[in-house]
């Protein structure tokens, strides 16, 4: 257990539905990252927060994706109008020299 | 796009043998890190090597870094069945990119008793 928690651990949804994931970081870590990992691949960077400010977004983060980190604490990642290609493991990480990863949320879009 | 490429993609060895995995990357880096991921579980940080370091040890792990060749290797000595996992190298370019990690596709290691 790295101290980073993610909820839910699994999410199955139908295409076109909206989903929201939550990440609770290690409290003293200012930087928070979201990654996406598909089967057989390494994680790919999606977006990054320094406290409450979203400082960088990958080109992978389409308009259907939005992330927030109100008050610089927990973070949410929302996917609107889900597509089957969104099926993946969504990982959150927080940083203190090294990045500590949460267990991930596995999304399956039917 | 993935920054790193691990080699080999898959490796099968017997307990007690050493396992060597290689990683190549494309652009200048600040740090290089190795992570382990057990099937269906989160990533566990193994070791970090800075761009000005050439070798680092942690327990049964030995990591080397050659910035002139843009490559790194991870050696696991005296492997155990519990070492069975996927191993990823990840690089970051420093503060300009917020220390976001670029991962390779990983090496799948199987250690048989």
Image (spheres, rainbow, N blue to C red):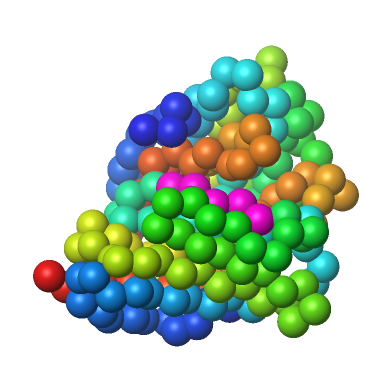
Q: Decide if residue B50 is on the left or right side of residue B55.
A: right
Report the residue at 20% width, 77% height from top: B14
- The total of numbered circles placed on residues is 0
Image coordinates of residue B65 in percent, x first then y, are 67, 69
Q: Is residue A32 above or below residue A41?
A: above
Q: Is residue A17 above or below residue B91?
A: above
A60 drawn magenta: no
Where's the C terminus of chain A, which quadrant?
A: bottom left
Q: Quadrant of residue A77?
A: top right
**Secondary structure that dominates the magenta span:** strand
Report the residue at 23% width, 70% height from top: B16
Nearer to me, A14 or B84: B84
Image coordinates of residue B19 in percent, x first then y, are 37, 74
Please state the extent of the stretch shown in magenta in the rendering: B43-49
Q: Is residue A32 visible?
A: no
Image coordinates of residue A67 in percent, x first then y, are 64, 37
Image coordinates of residue A29 in percent, x first then y, are 64, 25
Q: Is residue B43 above or below residue A48?
A: below
Q: Is residue B73 visible?
A: yes
Q: Decide if residue A78 is on the left or right side of residue B82.
A: right
Q: Quadrant of residue B25?
A: bottom right
Q: Residue furthest left?
A: B113
Report the residue at 54% width, 26% height from top: A25
Where's the N terminus of chain A, which quadrant?
A: top left
Q: Quadrant of residue A39?
A: bottom left
Q: Decide if residue B5 is on the left or right side of residue A9.
A: right
């Amino acid at each position: 257990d790295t101290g980073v928690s993610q909820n839910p651990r699994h999410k199955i949804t139908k295409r076109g539905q909206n989903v929201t994931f939550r990440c609770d970081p290690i409290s003293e870590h200012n930087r928070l990252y979201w990654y996406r990992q598909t089967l057989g691949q390494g994680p790919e960077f999606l977006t990054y927060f320094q406290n409450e400010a979203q400082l960088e977004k990958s080109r992978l983060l389409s308009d259907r994706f939005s992330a927030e980190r109100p008050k610089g604490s927990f973070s949410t990642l929302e996917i609107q109008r889900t597509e089957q290609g969104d099926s993946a493991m969504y990982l959150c990480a927080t940083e203190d020299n090294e990045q500590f990863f949460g267990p991930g949320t596995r999304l399956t879009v039917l | 796009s993935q920054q790193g490429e691990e080699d080999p993609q898959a490796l099968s060895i017997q307990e007690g043998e050493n396992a060597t995995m290689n990683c190549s990357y494309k652009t200048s880096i600040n740090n290089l890190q190795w992570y382990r991921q057990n099937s269906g579980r989160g990533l566990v940080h193994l070791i970090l090597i800075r761009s000005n370091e050439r070798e680092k040890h942690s327990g049964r792990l030995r990591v080397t870094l050659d910035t002139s060749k843009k490559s790194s290797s991870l050696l696991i000595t005296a492997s155990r069945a519990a070492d069975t996992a996927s191993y990823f190298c990840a690089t970051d370019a420093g503060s300009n990119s917020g220390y976001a990690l670029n991962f390779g596709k990983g090496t799948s290691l199987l250690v048989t008793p």
